[in-house]
Image (cartoon, helix red, strand yellow):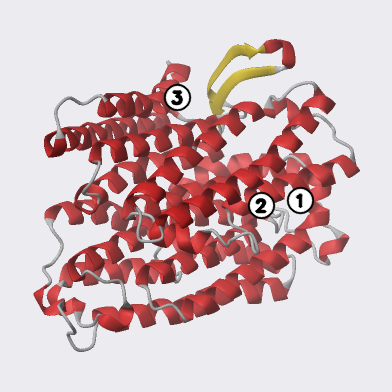
Amino acid sequence: MQPILLSLITYLPLAGAVAAFLCPGHGPERDRAARWLGLWTTLLTFGLSVLMWVGFDPSQPGLQYETRLGWLSDYGISYHTGVDGISLVFIMLTAFLTPLALGAGWRSVQTQGRDFVAAMLLLETALFGLFSAQDLVLFYVFYEATLIPGCLMIGIWGGAKRVWASLQFFLFTFGGSLFMLVGLITMWLHAGTTDIPALMHAGFSHSLQGWLLLAFLLAFGVKLPLFPLHAWLPDAYTEAPTPASAMLSGVLSKTGAYGLLRFGVLMFPDAVRQFAPYVLALGVVAILYAAFVAFAQTDMKRLIAYSSFSHMGMIAVGLFTLTAEGIDGAIFQMLSHGVVIAALFFCVAAVAWRAETRDIDALGGVAKQMPVLALLAMLFTMANVGLPGTGAFVGELLVLMGAIHVSIWVALLAGGTMIMGAVYMLSLYRRVLFGSVRGTVGLLRDLTVGEIAVLAPLAVVTLWMGVHPGTFTRIFDPMIMQAVHGSGVSVASSAMHGPVLHLASR
């Protein structure tokens, strides 16, 4: 039953996409039927993923819900899937956000609704396959498959510059993937297989590890994004329709961090210690650079996009502290950031759809007209700046705990995201929600029942992650502890000029 459950979760959205695309009828009736079909498909998928979460045993080493089928067996390539604690939490994040994104686009995506639902479901299947893949070729196939629906959603349903934004997104991601393909072939030539568990023990030489890590850094650094590979992000996040922005920032960007963790930190322990100081520096630069640029934004959605970029820099810092608590914090921050950034995009869309503008200077006094939105937006704003009691605080705290054992300066500079984020996020909140009513704001109406149904689960999870973080860390922490200490990643590096905290007694 276990392997069947994972396969069912992975391919149920694909079946839903085909069914939605084949919905009978014409025009609005067909789109409405496709939307309901897509929503129920994603809700059923989420229910199945909860069953997988309940049945997962964190204390059991190795993969669970594993499937291995012959594919290109003569070449050491197979259809091999399974989940560990790291994979599982990202599958849950994807399953949780997808139905909410579909709900958020119920009114905002007004044309070709059937095709949009099919694209969302295709993206969900590709993400499930990516996070559960245990063969590098299979991972590559699913990684590339995310490009198709992602580009379509930006290019067809996006804003005025949607074609340029979609083209940037495709070229940057596809170009980076070429480095992954070269690294994949090199690893296959060396080990004779692309099975990821086997590659973990392939014993690559120190020099080869360095070249392979560089290839994967370029591939996944684009999707993270890592400075200076971020040029596609502001336009893609801003021009994409709101559901796509939520999935791009909430889940798709996490595939870059996930890849760096899998095929960097955990697979190449010798090279990663050599590269860590440079990636830490790039992460700090991303944090500070994106925060400063966010100050200057006049478009609400673009400001949130740069905020996301800044927080992804914090995740890069956590991963490359090479400490158990730093990596735990990076994973937790990915989960928290996925929830919060999606919620912020939904809040911005609720205001912009009513006011017909995203210009900060054209808005004011929204809280008087939309008190429920103001309350929820305050929660998500506080979560975005790392207020204690929210999930973001836990993630950033763990990252800083890992960073301070590498360098106090890294910890201080990385911690700047909390201070600078508070400035630009609270400034945004004050200018839009408070002050005198401007323009057509006086005609706005508060959130509908459907919009509250989308935002309320995000609010609950945000608070739950802050109050009961162990619900999530218990899933992936044993895997991180085993991988870090078992692979030797946690050995202090002289290049990093600092000890690495050993957490075996935790």
Residue neighbourhood size for the residue with mark 2, other residues' Cα within 10 Å, grouped as few (<14), some (14–19), many (≥20):
many
Closer to viewer: mark 3 or mark 1: 3
Marks 2 and 1, how far apart at CA:
8 Å
Pointer 3 with pointer 1, Cβ within 8 A: no
In the figure, 471 relative to 72: above or below?
Answer: below
Residue 340 vs residue 77, the one in the foreground: 77
Label 2 sits on residue: 324
Q: Position of residue 332 (x, y in %)?
A: 51, 53
Marks 3 and 2, how far apart at CA:
28 Å
In this rendering, would 299 be left or right of 35? Answer: right
Q: Position of residue 106 (x, y in %)?
A: 21, 48
Q: Position of residue 499 (x, y in %)?
A: 79, 62
In the figure, 340 relative to 87: above or below?
Answer: below
In this rendering, would 252 be left or right of 361? Answer: right
Sequence-first tag of 2 and 1? 2
Residue 490's tag is 1
Q: Secondary structure at mark 1?
A: loop
The residue positioned 79% from the left and 21% from the top of the image is 192
In the figure, 357 relative to 260: above or below?
Answer: below
Residue 171 vs residue 126, the one in the foreground: 171
Q: Secondary structure at mark 3?
A: helix
Sequence-first tag of 3 and 2? 3
Pointer 2 with pointer 1, Cβ within 8 A: yes
The residue positioned 40% from the left and 24% from the top of the image is 11
Three-letter code for the amino acid on which mark 1 is drawn: Ser
Residue neighbourhood size for the residue with mark 1, other residues' Cα within 10 Å, grouped as few (<14), some (14–19), many (≥20):
many
In this rendering, would 352 be left or right of 410? Answer: left
Q: Which quarter of the figure has residue 224?
A: bottom right
Residue 464 vs residue 34, the one in the foreground: 34
Sequence-first tag of 3 and 1? 3
In this rendering, would 395 be left or right of 15? Answer: right
Label 3 sits on residue: 6
